[in-house]
Amino acid sequence: MPKSKPYLPTPDISYIVSAYHRPLMLPACLWSLAQQTHRNFEVIVTDNSTDKRSIAAHKKFVEQINECGLLGNPAPQFVYVHTAPKLKISDCYRSALYEIEHHARGQWYSFPCDDTYLVPEYGERMLSAAYSERADFLYCKYCVVGADASSWSGYRVWKMGPGRTIKTSLFVRSSVFQGFPGIGDTASPVLADWAYSASMRDRKVRTATVDEVLVVHN
């Protein structure tokens, strides 16, 4: 008789990770997720790459991290999806929307890019703040931002605020998520991020901030 599939509970968090043509960055991001102290989550890697070497490297690392068995669950929590051929415009926003429509099952969404590091307590701290503040949308008030994500050299602490929050620092309840406004064909990623946080403010979604530094965006 065929083996029955293991029961998979609904994860608290869906981490939807955008990967690009930089496979050397993805491992650090995924290892930071594998070490999260809050364990009920899934990771969906959306690959926006068109370069064959990058695609192969991204896919191989997702397979390797599942084979390590660090999470101790009956089925892998890390999923790889090559979104580039599925979308007319493949970017971090549209690939995340595609996965929310097709695969993501979490009660909360988080959107790290491949050049993001989340401290081990990130999910635990965000969930704790969400429930204690009865919030549906949260963001880290302070993030460490590096040269790849900014116009300066080196790393600095960047203060977030309503209408001025980068995607990698936000945490949103799936039931209130309505997509990313302002992602036109040529929209700046930072401006699109700000448009999203501004839309949550304009919708008067109950919001909380977490004042700890939990995110590094390179």
Image (cartoon, rainbow, N blue to C red):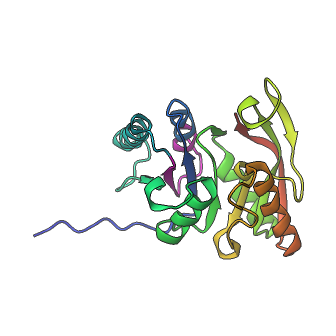
Q: Residue furthest left?
A: 1
Q: Residue at x 52, y 37 (%)?
A: 21
Q: Position of residue 136 (x, y in %)?
A: 75, 69
Q: Is residue 80 above or below residue 120?
A: below
Q: Position of residue 19 (x, y in %)?
A: 54, 44
Q: Residue at x 68, y 47 (%)?
A: 122
The magenta stretch spans which residues? 31-48
- Can you say which quadrant of the picture contains the C terminus? top right
On the image, which quarter does residue 81 sit in? bottom left
Q: How many marks?
A: 0
Front position in the image: 57 or 176? 57
| Residue 8 in the figure: left or right of residue 157 | left
Q: Residue at x 57, y 58 (%)?
A: 89
Q: Does residue 13 appear in this view?
A: no
Q: Does residue 11 appear in this view?
A: yes
- Can you say which quadrant of the picture contains the N terminus? bottom left
| Residue 93 in the figure: left or right of residue 158 | left
Q: Residue at x 38, y 52 (%)?
A: 76
Q: Is residue 55 magenta?
A: no
Q: Position of residue 83 (x, y in %)?
A: 47, 56
Q: Position of residue 35 (x, y in %)?
A: 55, 40
Q: Is residue 105 above or below residue 37?
A: below
Front position in the image: 33 or 47? 47
| Residue 115 in the figure: left or right of residue 187 | left
Q: Is residue 147 above or below residue 95?
A: above
